[in-house]
Image (spheres, rainbow, N blue to C red):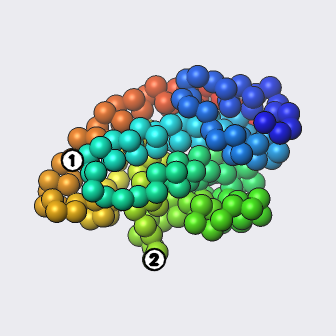
């Protein structure tokens, strides 16, 4: 990792309770920005959820192509703009979305990767791909939240030759066990402060 993380950020980046580590370049950006520890923990938890979710999607819907690496990157960076809007870590707000997108572009990331920072909360907009929906699903289900409209959009992209109901049941079957770990994930995030 480039730079030196504060002790609190370092702990958030290494806490085993937060799941898999972030990709090193993402961790480097968080360190350079002196990101709030809770943000680092959150990004790790959503990234870890996306690893589980994408593996389950690939197994449950084997004929549906998607860019797994892009989804994982999106999950690891979707809220990175909260470095500039830390009040949005504990309250509502969407200013972090465009800020995160612009930050990632300024760090040399391609638009197709940076876009997740601006699309993770607005999945019904134009140009939304399956990958955007999967990042949004990971950002919801990590905390046990289910969003019916988001899931219906995902089902429409995942169905293939299945009926919508069969596709919905298959998606539901894989989201339930992921969502069941929400309390553990929320406790892990809560163990890290805003500063």
Could you tell me which residue is drawn at 71 percent across and 25 percent down?
Answer: 11
Q: Residue furthest top?
A: 16
Q: Which residue is mark 2?
A: 126
Residue 81 left/right relative to 19: right
The alpha-carbon separation of the residues under discs 2 and 1 comes to 26 Å
Q: Give the image location of residue 192, x and y in percent.
A: 66, 29
Residue 133 visible to the viewer: no
Q: Are marks 2 and 1 in contact (CB under 8 Å)?
A: no
| Callout 1: SS | helix
What residue lies at 46% left-to-right and 40% top-to-bottom? 51
Q: Nearer the viewer, mark 2 or mark 1?
A: 1
Find residue 115 and report its image quarter: bottom right
Image point 15% across, 59% down: which residue?
162
Residue at x 59% of width, y 61% of height: 113
Crowd rating for badge 2 (residues with CA inside 10 Å; few <14, some 14–19, many 20+): few
Looking at the figure, which quarter contains the C terminus?
A: top right
Query: Considering only vertical position in the picture, is 8 above or below 89?
Result: above
């Amino acid at each position: 990792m480039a730079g030196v993380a504060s002790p609190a950020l370092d702990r958030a980046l290494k806490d085993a309770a937060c799941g898999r580590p972030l990709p090193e370049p993402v961790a480097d950006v968080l360190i350079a920005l002196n990101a709030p520890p809770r943000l680092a923990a959150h990004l790790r938890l959503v990234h870890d959820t996306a690893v589980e979710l994408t593996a389950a999607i690939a197994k449950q819907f084997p004929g549906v192509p998607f860019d797994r690496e892009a989804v994982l990157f999106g999950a690891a960076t979707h809220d990175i703009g909260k470095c500039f809007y830390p009040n949005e870590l504990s309250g509502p707000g969407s200013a972090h979305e465009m800020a995160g997108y612009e930050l990632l572009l300024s760090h040399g990331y391609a638009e197709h990767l940076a876009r997740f920072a601006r699309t993770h909360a607005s999945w019904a907009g134009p140009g939304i791909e399956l990958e955007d929906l999967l990042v949004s699903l990971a950002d919801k289900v990590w905390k046990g939240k289910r969003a019916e409209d988001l899931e219906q959009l995902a089902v429409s992209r995942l169905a293939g030759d299945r009926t919508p109901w069969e596709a919905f049941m298959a998606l539901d079957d894989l989201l339930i066990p992921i969502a069941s770990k929400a309390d553990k994930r929320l406790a892990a995030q809560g163990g890290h402060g805003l500063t």
